[in-house]
Amino acid sequence: MKNILLLLCIAFIILGFGSCKEDNPVEPEAGKRDYTWTADTINTYMDFIDRVGGASINSLWGVGSSGNGNTVRKYDGTAWPVVTTFTFIENVFALGCVSDNNIWAAGYDGYIWRYTGEWEQKLKYTETGVKGFLFLDFCPNRSDDIYLSGVAYYDDSRNRGIIMRYNGYSWKKVYHSSENSYYSRICKDAAYPDDYFIYSLKLSQILGQSDTTTYLKYDGNKMETIYSSPYFNNGCSLIRSIGGRVYFGMKDGIYRYDNNKFIRYITMPDGDYDWYMPFGRNEKDIFISGQYGIWHYNGTDTEKIMIFNEQNTFIDAAAFEKDIFILVTPDFKKVIIYHGTLKE
């Protein structure tokens, strides 16, 4: 049962939206809430979608895990057809977007792919003594400076969080944890330009003891724990870069890390929610997903703008100037991609 919960959590927290962009120097306007919504339900019994993302709406991709060999989907303006010219050979859980023709994907068994007009395998990362690697999240700063987080699996059941870096020519491992952990999310915060923030799920080796939700700060050399709590306190927490700042989703709201401490930025109502997960455009245009709907924060107040017809699990999201895409699933047989378009 614990392994099932772990796989569920990995599938829902390794989401990747956010490209580590710098803060906009112009004060953002309050986000609007007047959207036209459509819902695209996709049968994914054997070809699940775990990630959606792109540098623009013209290059928006869906990738994930599959029982038949991994399938790639691309949004064509109305639907998400399968791209029949390419199939990933392993499940994909990380998607990083630099530009429309510079997109990275990675996942099980240490595979890394790149799209530059067409998809191609760039690397299968291996290391002596390591059974395999699972890559979970990209943080692309520039085309020649991309970070990738994940986990290394050992034959003796050790699972160590890792960080990789691409310098424009090759990938290299730059950090290896000494603890059993999954580095599931990595983000850059403009308020801490020399650091990276990481969501880590620390795995307990003691029967009956809870796993641990941990937030880390990495300065390129050492790793510092800035928050730690038993997993059941916050469930599958999520961090995202929004408008250059990193936001942390927890059970009672959305937090930011300011002056080296956690500050609750958005207070959410108490209720039957395991966690709140943020995504959006800037600090005054943040969407918050729960199990039964979507809220919106406009810099002043929070309002529920969508109610799900059934309990859903939030998986991923992508936001553009006038469009947002929200990937959720009610079960493992289908996913629903909600598309919101701002009214003129």
Image (cartoon, helix red, strand yellow):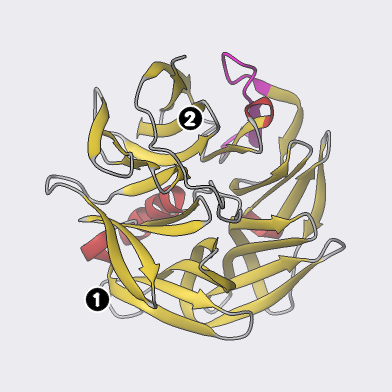
Specify the segment rendered in magenta: 66-82
Who is closer to the viewer here, 206 or 290?
Answer: 290
Note whether 27 is above or below 337 in the view shown: below
- Which residue is at a point 41% across and 81% down the rendered structure image? 225
Q: Secondary structure at mark 2?
A: strand
Secondary structure predominantly adopted by residues drawn in magenta: loop
Residue annotated with mark 1? 209
Distance between mark 2 and mark 1 Cα atoms = 37 Å
Sequence-earlier tag: 2 or 1: 1
Which residue occupies the extreme right position in the image?
169
Residue annotated with mark 2? 325
* Residue 80 falls within the magenta-colored stretch: yes
Note whether 75 is above or below 126 in the view shown: above
Q: Residues within 10 Å of mark 1 (few under 14, many from 20)?
A: few
- Which residue is at a point 39% across and 78% down the rendered structure image? 260
Q: Is residue 307 visible?
A: no
Q: Residues within 10 Å of mark 2 (few under 14, many from 20)?
A: many
Who is closer to the viewer here, 52 or 23?
Answer: 23
Residue type marked 1:
Gln
Residue type marked 2:
Phe
